[in-house]
Amino acid sequence: MNPSTQCHFCGSKGKRPCPAVGGMICPHCCGSKRGSEIFCPSDCYFYPFGPAQYDSFLAIEASFDRKSLEYIVRYYGKDKWYETLDRMAVSESDTESGGIIAAGAAAYYLLFHEKNDSGRTLAEEWEKENCSGLNNDERIILKARKNSSATVIEIQKLLDHQTMECIDLFNQSRSPFSVIDRRTAAQMPRFTRILTWIDDYPYFSRLGAGGIVISDILRREGMEIIEKIVKRRGKPDEKTVKRYLSENFGEAAHMLTELAFEKTKAMFRSMDVHECIATYDIVREPDKIKEILDTYPEFQREEECEQHGTVEYTWLRIGRSKAIEKSMFPLFRHKEDEEMVGTLGKIRVYSDRLEVEAFSKQKYEFAKKMAEKYFGSKICLKRESVVDLAKQVAEREREDFEEDEDEDSEAEMPESIPLELRQTVMAQFFREHYTKFLDDSVPALKGMSPREAAKDPAMRPALLELMKEHIRGIENQNKKQGLQISLDWVLEELGLLELKSP
């Protein structure tokens, strides 16, 4: 046999060239040695641990997951498995995704963290048996997962349809690394934080057992909360924190979910979001009511709403009614020279009565005072209705909260509007919003405006975190609505070039 056609390892007939050894190799030696005895290049067609062969990797991973579960149950029994599964549950709700995450967390814990009477993990016992039942590729997965631990990652860049550049927030010394996960890459915008396991392979890392997205409402304190819990058990260094998360994944995930839920409820309870309606009887000079409304510029008649003698007006925050803005939060104020103006509420005029409607108590009380000034003795308050919408939202069932965690609360437009028009309108909306935002006081920046904070080196970390939240929200909208809104111009204004989109 011609030596140039022989397998580099066993001497049998080589079926294909091996770029790692510079010669031929047979399928058996390739399959039994790749990635273990042979250091394969990432672009080799037959190497399943290269990014280009990710589909092959997924098939091997699924096979390993099945075999490892069988091994766990055979070793520990079903009762132990279900007990650990319950302990790793990430929430009280029984959802498919929650079940998958809990199963992954339970498998990682029982294989790589729980120790038997001999002081060995189940993975170490399996290795003592020469990894019985596993082929070469599956043994590589076992070895990679032995070094895996739960942590919190932050997505920095989306490199392609399946690859993200991430950082480990509990390992600041580690350089950014590539994580391949198609679903996460498709759904999650930059700067999303995820509590998960990380498996490291030669050319990419992998979200090993699913994970939970840490709510934006906990972005600043989520990490501190975990470190405080660990501190009660000893020094909260990287090793201790990751051991806690790996051994108590369900507890940590449940705690973060519950805290986010409670903070969301508290936030809504503190918000002035009320549906307020004052109904007045028109007691004299009914013809004068519409005449007054048509006289002042703040009352904009809605012609299309007129029917059966009823007339509706939008009450704008201009003219005498602009006085309310002095007491409003700075972000919601409008300058004199702005084209866009704010609203105070609605006024509806019927044949015998007048209704004033507003969606905050602040606006409502102001509107009632102004109504008395405009109409005086011509009207008489008959009844009032004040509904606390924020409280209603705060008291929703958990299923609604979890559904909303997958949604985004930013402005949306109906899909029936052409994409090009949606892009134009939304781009203009965000341009105006962030033009004001740059100079408005922000509580998260200790009352400084973003421009002011950008000039203070001590405030730069807080400004970076704030803008990451904003970018994540905008890019989430882009993914959902097919838009291309960018905050790069804001980042340039603030000198935060490292956050610009790649």
Image: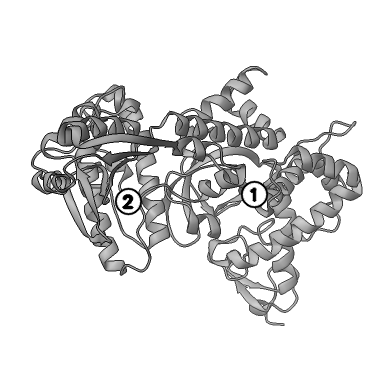
Alpha carbon separation for disc pair 2 and 1: 27 Å
Question: Is residue 285 toward the left or the right of residue 233 in the image?
Answer: left
Question: Is residue 373 toward the left or the right of residue 50 in the image?
Answer: left
- Crowding around mark 2 (Cα neighbors within 10 Å: few <14, some 14 to 19, many 20+) is some
Q: For this rendering, which residue is in front, 321 or 272?
A: 321
Residue at numbered disc 1 = 208
Q: Is residue 447 visible?
A: yes
Q: Position of residue 499 (x, y in %)?
A: 32, 43
Which residue occupies 70% across, 41% down?
A: 92
Q: Secondary structure at mark 1?
A: strand
Q: Hey, what amino acid is under mark 2? A: Ser
Residue 31 is marked as: none
Q: Hey, what amino acid is under mark 1? A: Gly
Q: Position of residue 468 (x, y in %)?
A: 37, 40
Name the residue furthest front: 284
Q: For this rendering, which residue is in front, 91 or 496?
A: 91
Q: For this rendering, which residue is in front, 348 or 137?
A: 348
- Crowding around mark 1 (Cα neighbors within 10 Å: few <14, some 14 to 19, many 20+) is many
Q: Are marks 2 and 1 in contact (CB under 8 Å)?
A: no
- Give the answer, above or below, for where 31 lies relative to 312: below
Q: For this rendering, which residue is in front, 151 or 25?
A: 151
Q: Position of residue 211 (x, y in %)?
A: 61, 46
Q: Secondary structure at mark 2?
A: loop
Residue at numbered disc 2 = 501
Q: Position of residue 450 (x, y in %)?
A: 25, 32
Which circle's residue, 2 or 1, is located before the other in the chain?
A: 1
Question: Is residue 5 toward the left or the right of residue 374 in the image?
Answer: right
